Image: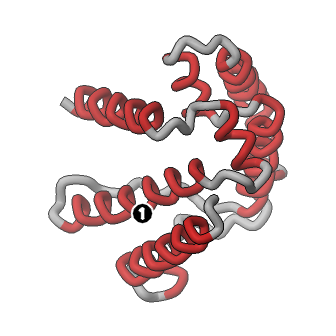
Amino acid sequence: MDLLWGLVTGALFGVLLQRCRVLRYDKQLGALRLKDMTIVKFMLTTVVVGAVGLHLLAAVGVVSFSIKSFNIGGVVLGGLLFGVGWGLCGYCPGTAAGALGEGRLDGLWALAGMVLGAGLFAELYPLLQRTVLAWGDLGKLTLGEALGTGPWPVILLLAAGAGLLFRFFERRRL
């Protein structure tokens, strides 16, 4: 049943990616050049809706969280690699798969890069574990725990910040 829910929600997410036109190369390029914030608005919306939905499901006992350890070295290295890959290919992982689903073969290059990157990560994992992944390891920590507030004030702040940012983008016609 879990796999069926994963398939249904994944397909729904793919439909939303396609309907919002965030799979288009011009939207990707516009986001990278800070001239079109469609992708930023789409992703912030998914983050806020996901945060609210997951915490509501956790509150009623339907799901439980499996929090990974937060280490600064891994976040910095992973963020840099993600940004370079997005800049080189013009796609992030989800949009590359969606673009291929729309029939655009240029998404294959991004998917090939993801497979290559995953293989390199697996090969280098023992070395990374002793070096980069050990830098600034803060353990299994959430932002709400770090602030001592619990999740809901953080989610409300995130939603309010997203709303203000959307308003700013709309006024600038971004």
Q: Residue at x 70, y 23 (%)?
A: 110
Q: Residue at x 53, y 57 (%)?
A: 41
User: Relative to 100, is 118 above or below?
Assistant: below
Query: Looking at the image, what colour scheme do you see?
Result: secondary structure
Please provide percent x and percent y for residue 73.
78, 58
Please provide percent x and percent y for residue 43.
52, 52
Q: Nearer the viewer, residue 168 or 138?
A: 168
Q: Residue at x 31, y 58 (%)?
A: 54
Relative side of 86 to 42, left or right: right
Q: Nearer the viewer, residue 35 or 122?
A: 35
Q: Residue at x 65, y 20 (%)?
A: 107
Please provide percent x and percent y for residue 13.
39, 37
Please provide percent x and percent y for residue 91.
68, 33
Q: Quadrant of the N terminus?
A: top left
Q: Is residue 127 visible?
A: no
Relative side of 16 to 37, left or right: left
Q: Is residue 151 visible?
A: yes
Residue located beneath label 1 in the image: 48
Q: Nearer the viewer, residue 78 or 93?
A: 93
Amino acid type, callout 1: Val
